[in-house]
Amino acid sequence: MATQSDVLAAIEANLQQAMERKKPREQTVKFELDGQVRACCLSKPLNYSDLLKAIENLFGNETLTSIDRILCLFSRDDALRLPVTNDDDLNKVIGIAETNQATKLNFLLIRKKGFNPSQTKSKANPYDSDSISDDGRLSEINDTGLDSPPPGTIATPKRRTTKNTTIKSSTPKDGGIFIPESGDDVYSSGSSSVVSRESSSSENSTRRRLPGNYIVKRTAIGSTVSGGSAISSSSNSSHTSSSSSESICTQCSCSGHHYKSPQTPSNWKLGRQLGQGAFGKVFLCYDVDTGSELAIKQIPIRGLSLETSREVKILECEINIYKQLNHERIVRYHGAVRTEDYLQIFMEYMTGGSVREQILNYGALTEQLTKKYTRQILEGLIYLHNNRFIHRDIKCANILRDISGNIKLADFGTSRRLIAITNQNQQDSGTIGTAHWTAPEIIQGSIFGRKADIWSLGCTIVEMLTTGPPWQNLQPIAAIFHIATCDKPQYQLPENASNSAREFIDACLTKDYHQRSTAEDLMNHAFISDLYNHNHHHYHHEQNCTQTPTNPTLMSF
Ligand SMILES: Nc1ncnc2c1ncn2[C@@H]1O[C@H](COP(=O)(O)OP(=O)(O)OP(=O)(O)O)[C@@H](O)[C@H]1O
């Protein structure tokens, strides 16, 4: 007679078999190349050479010779993308997809620099845009006039190049840093729910409530900016222009007399280079009219595709809106201007450079300084979050210092659109440098909100105390895999790190975003409130005057 454990073992074996039978034998893969999206099903187990063969089958035999990179897109808003170069990379992205129960793998194919898509005749496929919905099912084609789609095509409404997109119809790609007014912490990145309640009542206009009670009316940005404006070209050494930014801004109804925001310089000289990031170079900029010094980020934009040019115009317009964000912990934008060669973003000049550079020059920060910076980052985040914005790129490279050692949040709101803009004509994708700071829910791709900034803050504190974020020894793709699959991120704090620092970091790096603290919660945490209560005088004093360091360290330069 069978014992109870035999019966249990038999049930378990049957279950196992049933599970195996239920597992799909095929993997849906979707590729995007030059705005064309095609998909197919490949047999499992998938390997890298299958992927390459599929690309040739879908786009034509010579396609591979013109491809520079294959990037796997992890989040639905495409903000997170990692290169796949071999079987190992592919296994990792498959692992992440399985963990997140994703039904398909999405790849973006980047052409080699200087490649002109009109040179190749890609395999004809009249169903490039719409045929399989996001859940993998076939869907109707509305605008091709064709009766039924062939297999191997996929719906990507958000990548359509031909339609003018208004802010309302845009996905978070157009406004992912904007939080719905409901105050919900999260929203689906795949829906159009990113617009505020106000905007959802109108097809063509979006009203944003901005700090200082200024209401900005945005009229259908997609069409507004495509209306164009006088684009001035500047030499690299000086520039005099009535410039496009103000005219675009006027068209957006976001400039003029309704609010106070800094003027975009119209008569300025380029100074020395301050640094270089993934998207372009940053220079000092002397405003001839006001005598003030600003920083200017120049992003190369020559030779972009139509869709990417549209992204540039929208970013230019957005920055002219962000000018209104005004807080002592936010690096102020002074506007943006397009020339034939560059998108130029004017910003407040921060004399101290980034905290990343500080760490590279002087090593890990002390816990006391980390506390001060953390508190100041939180002040900036509370301001942004209360105004329904998400920064989405918090890391030491985006924290800039002023002359007295206080910090401000920089690169607010630009990173994801810059990734889209620089995909084509830039060697390195910015997101690769952001992977280690990315929250697990962003990797899962269905949800993101204010709490994603809190996760990145936790990684940034680890970076300040140890010189690198969690999983710092791993390549970006492996780091993404571990963030998505492990319960706790891996890092080693200095032995003398306080318990309150450890608890604070744990509160930020809580995997379940429902359980993760908000910026306001963290402001009351002992790690921070300790600084406020015991060093209150010191904290404010520091902001206003220069102190002689009590423990000077001799540095060799
Ligand atoms: N407003 C500013 N004032 C002074 N220096 C700046 C300013 N903005 C940027 N920099 C300098 O330029 C460097 C490059 O900045 P940039 O924002 O292009 O890249 P990043 O933030 O370092 O990296 P990534 O491109 O990956 O975000 C910074 O490290 C800093 O030294």
Image (cartoon, rainbow, N blue to C red):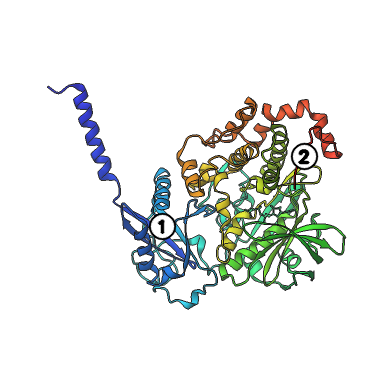
Quadrant of the rendered image containing residue 281: bottom right
| Disc 2 within 8 angstroms of ligand 1 (CB) | no
Judging by the rendered image, the residue that carries numbered circle 1 is 133
Distance Cα–Cα, label 2 vs label 1:
62 Å
Q: Is residue 223 visible?
A: yes
Residue 86 screen position, x and y as percent: 41, 55
User: Can residue 446 be seen in the rendering of this structure?
Assistant: no
Q: Is residue 319 left or right of residue 446?
A: right
Query: Where residue 352 sits: x, y (%)?
Result: 76, 48
The residue labelled by disc 2 is 554
Q: Quadrant of ligand 1?
A: bottom right
Amino acid type for the residue under numbered disc 1: Ser
Crowding around mark 2 (Cα neighbors within 10 Å: few <14, some 14 to 19, many 20+) is few
Q: Position of residue 377 (x, y in %)?
A: 70, 40
Residue 491 in which image quadrant: top right
Measuring 78% from the left and 50% from the top, which residue is drawn there? 351
Dot 1 alpha-carbon crowd within 10 angstroms: few under 14, some 14 to 19, many 20 or more: some
Q: Residue furthest front?
A: 556
